[in-house]
Amino acid sequence: MGAKEDIDRLTAELKVYQDKYYKEGVSLVSDSEYDRLTDMLIELEREHPELQHPDSPTRRVGSDLTNDFPEVRHTIPVLSLDKAYSDEAVLDFFSKSIQKEGGALSFAAEEKIDGISMVLYYEGGVLRRAVTRGNGEIGNDVTPNIATMPSVPLSLPEPIDIAVRGEVYLEKADFERLNAEESDESKRAANPRNLAAGTVRRQKSSEAGRVPLTMFCYEGFWTDRSQTPSDHLHILSRLKQLGFRINPHLAFFASDRAQAEDKLRDAGLEGEAYAFSQIDEFIRHKAAERSGLGYEIDGLVFKINELDVRERFGYTEHHPRWAIAYKFEAPQAEAKLLGITVQVGRTGRITPVAEITPTKLGGSTIRRATLHNQEYIDELELAIGDTVSISKRGDVIPAVESVIEKNSEGSTTYHLPSQCPCCHTPIIQVGGLQYCPYYDCPDQVRGRIAYFASADQMDIETLGPKTVSLLYDAGILRSIEDIYSADYSSAADLPGIGEKSIKLLEKGIRESLGRPFAVVLSSLGVADIGKKSAELLVRNGFSSIDAILDAVDRKDCEAFARIPGFGELTGARIVEAFSSERLRATIEALRKAGVHMDAAQDAKDGGGEEQIFSGEVWCITGSFEHFNPRSKALKEIERRGGRTVSSVTSKTTHLLAGEGGGSKRADAERLGVRIVSEDEFLKMIGTDEEQDGGDGQLLLF
Ligand code: IVH
């Protein structure tokens, strides 16, 4: 038999197996036999790409070739929806529409799936393209990834030309399972929509195919208008008949229930029938049902059923006038994206930052929000001028969550520049992230110095990011080691810096010479060595820089990998980082300046505190008279060798309890953890009232 016959036969056979499996859950052959046949077909198609059937079952498996998602123009309007946040607003939409039409209307009500909007284009009944919404006119062609989804027909039972719109999403249970399987915490998605968005844009369709995405379709656009059914219900039933997945949770509104029931029956669809007057009942019922659904919905969509009316109503620039979305929650905050600035961090990492219209959120006014990286921007299909929703994640960093309304200027998805905005070195890609690779890039140098001096590290008071920038620009500070050798006298002329602040700065720098070795180690800003890992190194035999450098020179990654919580990758990274000549030079210069490079110096040198809390694990609760903010107390514990944790567990040895405080005290009592009051604590660290200098000010701070 020739290749064509082989391909035709295998295609037909596998299609039968696939259909039976996906539609009825029945396996007609063993997994190994199925895989064997699939591999054979993949191989044949690779040799003879021209013979591949457009609906070949191998498209379900995906491929290892890299996708590039070309931009393509939509041939249907891919608009958004007008929004309502109350029952009244929906009822108002009903009555205004009826008034405008001057006759009876009916409305379909669908769940608003919180997923990724997708348009499937079929030509002659074959899936030609799956395109993301993009800016509504131009989207990305993500066909190889979408073709892996069993719910997306690769071919239709009839050779028609049609565009089908729907929502690609991930079931909550699948999201939970996949996220739990992801061992790298930083790679876990925040919600099912994020994971679905990431999957739709996976570079390898074989990988996208492993995520069980699915799709509900809700609109159909026939190229041959004469084939278009006369109302929405018949569109849905036709889509179903063509093999698309339709959300069975359908409701229908008419002036009375009986009429609504009739229309559903006429279209051959199951659904809940309602009278207009029951809108509040329906919305309450859906809101209650929401958390029990297997997928996320963020609202309900109400659409005029009659197609001729839809045509008369038409569209605004943003949305059809014949539909409205009821949203369960108003967005936390809405803002317009004015621009995107590109920051260069101390490690060279490039971060796009959204500049937004000033927006009140959680008691503060937000002007900027992080956009993480290019991938995040691509997933949101974010363009300048878009209206976006902003949230504060974990109540700290404001983030752009989603696009509410596309810009009307037609701008397309934003792309990071190809060069570092600071030093113009070409940007490189590492994993999904972008970096400036130039070590002497001014933004990186300023960042490294500011990090070294920051309160969490060497804690050099008055050497904040602004001062660092000033001193860098004046040529006074050009590296970490310059901090200890610079001549600050010429800085007196700089704006905002005077004799007095120079004295303070010099005092701060002198004091920093006493910081423990573990702090010095983490201040160097080496990737993988934060505060905790620096302490772990010190406690696990690497109590001096020489001990570390010895192991590095022997390329003994294993010595680091053995430390609990480190592992091979960290071991290798530490060896690589400390092999850098630049870092070595910094270390030697700091050593000369008198910075601790050995933990043995810590206790001897007046700067270091006696390690009275060594081996102890402290937690903290309530508020304090002498430690405001509370982190000051944590610092005192850490300076004395104690470890601090955020919750009371069986491993906790002490709970420092101030005024108030809640469940942690009960936890401590239950677990027999020693509870220490503020007064007791002050005595322990040798700063009780008697030493208080008499004016209520602690000498310690
Ligand atoms: S109808 C022109 N129906 O919500 C028709 N949209 O905020 C417009 N969505 O971009 C869409 N479920 O991605 C429609 N049942 C549903 C929907 C739905 C989710 C999404 C869709 C759209 C967005 C509008």
Image: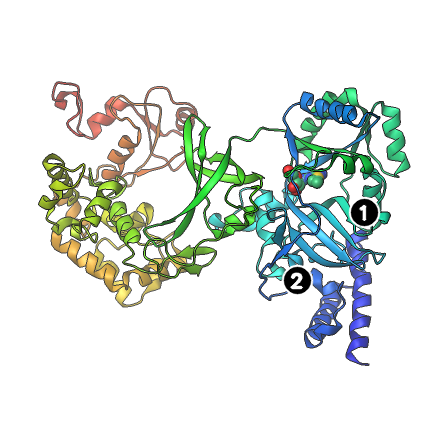
- The one nearer the camera, 620 or 230, is 230
Q: What residue would you read off at disc 2?
A: 62
Q: What residue would you read off at disc 1?
A: 239
Residue 442 position (above or below residue 286): below
- Using the rendered view, name the quadrant where residue 558 is placed: bottom left
Quadrant placement of the N terminus:
bottom right
Q: Residue 488: give its label.
A: none
Left or right of residue 572: residue 256: right
Q: Position of residue 396 (x, y in %)?
A: 42, 35
- The residue mark sitting in front, 2 or 1, is 1
Q: Position of residue 286 (x, y in %)?
A: 71, 28
Label 2 neighbour load within 10 Å: few <14, some 14-19, many 20+: many
Q: Position of residue 685 (x, y in %)?
A: 20, 30
What residue appears at the point 70 percent right and 73 percent down from the top-left corner? 49
Left or right of residue 512: residue 390: right
What residue appears at the point 46 percent right and 45 percent down from the top-left corner? 371
Mark 1 near ligand 1 (CB under 8 Å)? Answer: no
Q: Of the residues under marks 2 and 1, which one precedes in the sequence?
A: 2
Residue 397 position (above or below residue 437): above
Q: Quadrant of ligand 1?
A: top right
Label 1 neighbour load within 10 Å: few <14, some 14-19, many 20+: some
Q: Position of residue 170 (x, y in %)?
A: 65, 46
Q: Label 1 amino acid? A: Leu
- The one nearer the camera, 496 or 394, is 496
Most distant residue in the bottom direction: 1
Kind of element beneath mark 2: loop
Measured in 3D between alpha carbons, the distance from the residue under mark 2 to the one under mark 1, in whole angstroms, is 25 Å
- Using the rendered view, name the quadrant where residue 89 is placed: top right
Left or right of residue 605: residue 355: right
Q: Label 2 amino acid? A: Gly
What residue appears at the point 28 percent right and 68 percent down from the top-left corner? 554
Residue 294 appears in the figure = no
